[in-house]
Image (cartoon, grey):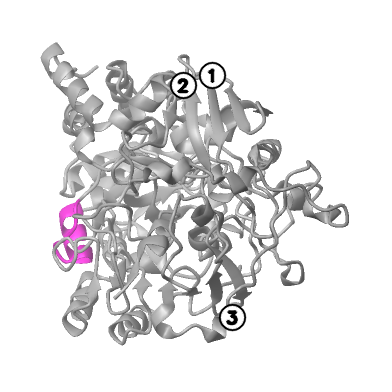
Amino acid sequence: MYRRLNSTTRKAWLFRLLALSLVVTTVMVAAVACSEEEPTATPVPPTATAVPPTATTAPEPEPEHEDAMDGDGMMMKEPAPLIDPDSVSREKTLIVMSGGQDGRYPDWENFNNYVPGGVGGWHTGPLQTMSEPLIMFNLLTGEHEMWLAESMDISDDFREVTLSIRDGVYWSDGTPFSADDVAFTFALVQENQDSMVHTAEIHLLDSVEVIDGNKVHFTLKEPSPSWWVNTLTSNHGLSEHILPKHIWEGQNAQEFTFYDPAQGWPISTGPFALASASPEQKVFVRRDDWWAVEAGFKDLPAIEKVVYIPQRDETARAQMIIRNEIDAMSMVPVDTLLDVFEQNPSVVSWSKQEPPYGYLDWCPIGLFVNNAGDSPVAQSKDIRWALNYALNRETLVSNAERGAGTVAYHMVTPYAWFDPFEEVLQPIYEKHSLDTSDHYDLLDERMATAGYTKNSDDMWEKDGDVIEMSIGFPSWLARYGVHIVKQLEDAGFDAEMDQSPGTGEAFGRGERDYQFGCKGPSGVLGADPYYMLSLYSSATFRDIGEPPVNPWATARWRNSEFDDIVTEMSKIPATDPQTMDLFEDAMEIWYEELPDIYVSQLIIRHLGSENYWKGWPSFDDNYGVLHPWQQEFLKIVTRLEAN
């Protein structure tokens, strides 16, 4: 066992962590309501939760209009006519390039976020314009804002969570939104959790029920202080997609795409409605009858139309934002980004036009291994460590990020609150000689232990077989590919870069051995370090061929001692000093086995143009993340102002 923090250091750590997690610890010991006194990512005015009398005291309908009531006797609303998308000028349109590949959305007709293939469809427009969470979470600060839920109570033993659902919320077809929709969604996902994706920590849920009219009561199988963060918020929780019970009830949850323009599907509670969808684009128009305006919760967005278009290659998308043909887009390499800044001064990143040209994201980058496979790497921790010693992180990150990057050794992003945890890892780094340099001497030792010798081609060989590695690389990480492959080849591994479509999805199902990507949400205050460790626990393990619980639970690695530690960690708040001890114990096991090899920190360099729209989030106005794939982008869509 390695040294632990002394009592003085532990107390200092505890006070720092308590200060940083004030909003999280407050919600865990008392009823939480959205008020001026609670730190929120987007401050809500005092009228945010007040519903005008007309929302709940509507006059009784005339007998001849029986269809004005839903099946539960709640007042329906006649939807307002949608804006004609062709009538909206460019000055009132937000154009976003995100998702898809080579100018097409392959899953454009799938609006079911819980089935494989639906994630890409839901996250490219509907999530950011139509869908609203129960609780909106700021991933960079740990602050939150009650949204469809008005308040939350958490029991002292962290086994029960009660949400009060906001009154006056309506689906876009005029049906009242209620606690029944929330309970139905969680029950449906719980029933199908073994075959669904984006299920967060549904496996910890014991039961869900509607109580006291419009409250949802969750009972957990065991104490979990961070369950609400991981499962009830926009932090990739189930609440990214609350389902309308009146449409989904009786549907086949594994096959229903929730798309039928003739019936007006998909519907939502959000400020925009789908006007059209195709492989080339998705068009959303503003709903002038959005419930949040009448309820005094939010103002009507200035944007009248949002268009999501799929990714083009690096050069094409750079030229499109330079010419103001798009207003927001995903990342490009630093060299290209600097050219964009020079040619269009109105383009900004989260750090404006200053290094690191974005923000440190909660999704560290690494070389990921399918540990349930039958590859030599999956079967041997010595080979995994040899791969680690083959990498020179300093050179790799410098080349890939043009000097504006940060190395990574593990799954947690090093935000300030994580500093004390990083301290206890130092002896483990020293034990394993883990640093930014390559170590060929240690590589040779590990490969010899695994029974390999160098052949005449200077490649590692055993029983006539060399180690072949076809590594999937998404286009947005292609800048790492050449450098990673070169370092592995120089070290004696037969590595190649595979950019064919679908490598990430196949790896997620355990049908490929290697993938280069990122894993998160890491560094989210209130959920970590427990949450990222839980991605390596047996609770998230699935057999090869089955989809992962979420996009990052792909290691398919199991260790019973590690499981026991993570289970204990799940039962206590992150501010409990015992969390530090458990984290250290878990990481000793994790590093001994090294199921994944982390390389660098992800810096999100998504861009927004101020040519048509101003008010993008930034380091000096940190109300959200400039990331058009995340649900926090909804806050941007509702807050941007015409320039």
Q: What secondary structure prevails in the magenta region?
A: helix
Q: Nearer the viewer, residue 54 or 502?
A: 54
Residue 268 vertical position relative to residue 402 in the rendered view, above or below: above
The type of residue carrying mark 2 is: Thr
Q: Is tag 1's residue or tag 3's residue first in the polypeptide sequence?
A: 3
Which mark, by number, is residue 567?
2
- Which of the two marks, 1 or 2, is nearer to us in this view? 1
Q: Nearer the viewer, residue 445 or 281?
A: 281
Instruction: Say which residue label 3 marks.
Output: 84
Q: Is 127 on the left or on the right of 20, as rendered?
A: right
Q: Is tag 1's residue or tag 2's residue first in the polypeptide sequence?
A: 1
- Asked if the residue under mark 2 is in contact with the one under mark 3, i.e. CB atoms within 8 Å, the reply is no
- Asked if the residue under mark 2 is in contact with the one under mark 1, i.e. CB atoms within 8 Å, the reply is yes
Which residue of the protein is positioned furthest toward the left in this rendering? Answer: 8
Real-space Cα distance between discs 3 and 2? 53 Å
Residue 50 screen position, x and y as percent: 49, 42
The type of residue carrying mark 1 is: Glu
Which residue is at 37% across, 45% downward? 44
Real-space Cα distance between discs 1 and 3? 51 Å
The type of residue carrying mark 3 is: Asp
Which mark, by number, is residue 222?
1
Real-space Cα distance between discs 1 and 2? 9 Å
Which residue of the protein is positioned furthest toward the top in this rendering? Answer: 7
Q: Is tag 3's residue or tag 2's residue first in the polypeptide sequence?
A: 3
Residue 413 screen position, x and y as percent: 27, 43
